[in-house]
Image (tube, rainbow, N blue to C red):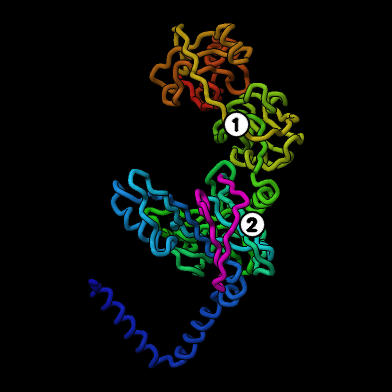
């Protein structure tokens, strides 16, 4: 390693100066070590914590069964595999197959992957990640005392990456569950697992963020605890010895630890585990809308004080939201009294609501708040979006750079709307830069519904070029507010 000679000289100079100062200030010899000792004493000691929780953390080994047929034409390396299988399963080897008859296939287990998990009850219920046991034919759980059990997968939920296993045991060590809703950024946590198949490995760090957005149904806990392949499914534990998360993902450029790891909040994981224990699957609610984030510009133009809420961009025809009166362009502000800070909050709240129950959805529409009743139904796959409308008219452009024409009665019926205009041309200007294109349907300008092209163009002509405006645009089945500033004349 190349040494930095200038840095070394500077360090030596500093040491010499410090040493010289000791001759004139002997008291420093007493004060400096005392301050250092206090700093060391303030560091967390994880030893008792690890002794307490370690026995309930398990290694999870998964295997799959392979069927191999001996004989001519085997793939490269297959004969060696068959020989190993004969040694383990066939004693002195299997007899040769009669001439002209295909040999019987031989079956054996091969290791598929290694992960971690932890015991949540003395009766042998184990939590881990869904991706740890995905595709496995057999799952084996090994405790710290080297006892090994064959586990049954009671269920797995891919959306939250949570799986529940059961092993036949009693009086097993178990972990206490914490409250992931009360965690604080900066608090110390540890992870225990089997990174790279190194069992009972302990790493420590702090919580970096509480609700890191990664998907529709899950906001993860971010930490700087070292988590590597094999740690998946292991617990993230606070200083009280309580599980606050299941280590699930890492942000990495190399495949190994890169300083950022993510855990499934234990509150969400236990809700999933309860359903898996009862039914083997997870059911979630839906109301039949597609939503988008609300920008600051759109919020201000609609008269909202902040950019909180979920913008409704599509309402499923005949779905719960449609029946409840929710419309495209509504801003959902609350669900059952809970404020929607970000659009991703809504699917989680709806998903965890009991099927068949009535929910109160508070929406912002035309400058006022309304409360609507919506019945929760079971989540289904999203419908495939339709192709956008393609009109042929070509009228003159307005101050937004849009050429707009009326929708035909047939098109209004197809789209299930009473008014609106359709873009037939976009010139180089504010609308083009905002991404609008021919075929888009215009439903609303600021807080006013669009009846036809004439009314829309008249409203555009009255816009203040010093203030941004928003247009509710429908493309296919999706509608979204777009912020525009008209060109000054």
The quadrant of the picture occupied by the N terminus is bottom left
**Quarter-of-image position of residue 489:** top left
In the displayed structure, 174 sits above or below 220; it is below
Q: Which mark is residue 425?
A: none
Q: Check disc 1 and report the residue beneath it.
A: 311
> Residue 139, how many percent across, how many down?
54, 57
Mark 1: which secondary structure? strand
Q: Check disc 2 and report the residue beneath it.
A: 180
Alpha-carbon span between mark 1 and mark 2: 28 Å
Lower sequence index among marks 1 and 2: 2
Query: Which residues are the magenta region?
Result: 132-158
Task: Answer left or right for 270 relative to 19.
Answer: right
Q: Nearer the viewer, residue 3 or 280?
A: 280
> Residue 376, how many percent across, how many down?
71, 34
Residue at the location (45% across, 64% down)?
Answer: 197
Query: Could you classify mark 1 by the number of other residues whose Cα lies within 10 Å: few (under 14), some (14-19), or many (20 or more)?
Result: many
Outermost residue on the front side: it is: 98
């Amino acid at each position: 390693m190349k040494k930095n000679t200038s840095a070394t000289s500077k360090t030596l100079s500093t040491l010499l100066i410090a040493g010289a100062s000791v001759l004139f200030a002997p008291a420093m010899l007493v004060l400096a070590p005392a301050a250092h000792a206090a700093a060391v004493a303030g560091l967390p000691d994880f030893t008792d914590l690890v002794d307490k929780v370690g026995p309930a953390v398990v290694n999870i080994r998964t295997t799959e069964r392979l069927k191999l047929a001996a004989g001519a034409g085997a793939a490269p390396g297959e004969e060696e595999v068959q020989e190993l299988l004969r040694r383990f399963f066939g004693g002195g080897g299997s007899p040769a197959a009669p001439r002209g008859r295909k040999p019987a296939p031989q079956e054996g287990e091969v290791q598929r992957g290694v992960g971690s998990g932890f015991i949540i009850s003395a009766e042998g219920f184990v939590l881990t990640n869904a991706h740890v046991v995905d595709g496995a034919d057999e799952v084996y759980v090994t405790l710290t005392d080297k006892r090994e059990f064959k586990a049954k997968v009671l269920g797995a939920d891919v959306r939250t990456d949570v799986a529940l296993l059961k092993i036949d045991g009693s009086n097993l060590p178990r972990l206490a569950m914490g409250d992931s809703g009360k965690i604080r950024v900066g608090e110390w946590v540890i992870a225990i697992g089997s990174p790279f198949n190194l069992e009972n490995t302990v790493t420590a760090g702090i919580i970096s963020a509480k609700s890191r957005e990664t998907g529709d149904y899950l906001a993860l806990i971010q930490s700087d605890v070292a988590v590597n392949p094999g740690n998946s499914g292991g617990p993230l534990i606070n200083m009280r010895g309580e599980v606050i998360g299941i280590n699930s993902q890492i942000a990495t450029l190399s495949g190994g630890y890169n300083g950022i790891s993510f855990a499934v909040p234990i509150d969400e994981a236990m809700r999933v585990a309860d359903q898996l224990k009862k039914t083997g699957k997870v059911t979630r609610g839906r109301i039949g809308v597609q939503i988008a984030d609300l920008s600051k510009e759109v919020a201000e133009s609609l008269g909202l004080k902040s950019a909180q809420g979920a913008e409704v961009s599509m309402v499923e025809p005949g779905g719960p939201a449609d029946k409840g009166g929710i419309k495209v362009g509504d801003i959902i502000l609350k669900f059952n009294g809970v404020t929607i800070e970000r659009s991703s909050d809504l699917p989680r709240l709806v998903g965890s609501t009991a099927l068949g129950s009535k929910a109160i959805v508070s929406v912002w529409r035309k400058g006022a708040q309304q409360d609507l009743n919506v019945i929760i139904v079971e989540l289904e796959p999203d419908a495939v979006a339709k192709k956008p409308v393609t009109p042929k008219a070509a009228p003159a452009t307005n101050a937004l750079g849009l050429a707009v024409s009326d929708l035909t009665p047939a098109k209004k019926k197809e789209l299930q709307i009473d008014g609106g205009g359709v873009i037939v041309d976009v010139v180089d200007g504010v609308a083009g830069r905002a991404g609008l294109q021919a075929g888009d349907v215009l439903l609303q300008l600021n807080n006013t519904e669009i009846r036809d092209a004439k009314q829309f163009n008249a409203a555009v002509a009255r816009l203040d070029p010093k203030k941004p405006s928003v247009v509710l645009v429908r493309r296919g089945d999706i509608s979204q507010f777009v912020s525009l500033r008209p060109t000054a004349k």
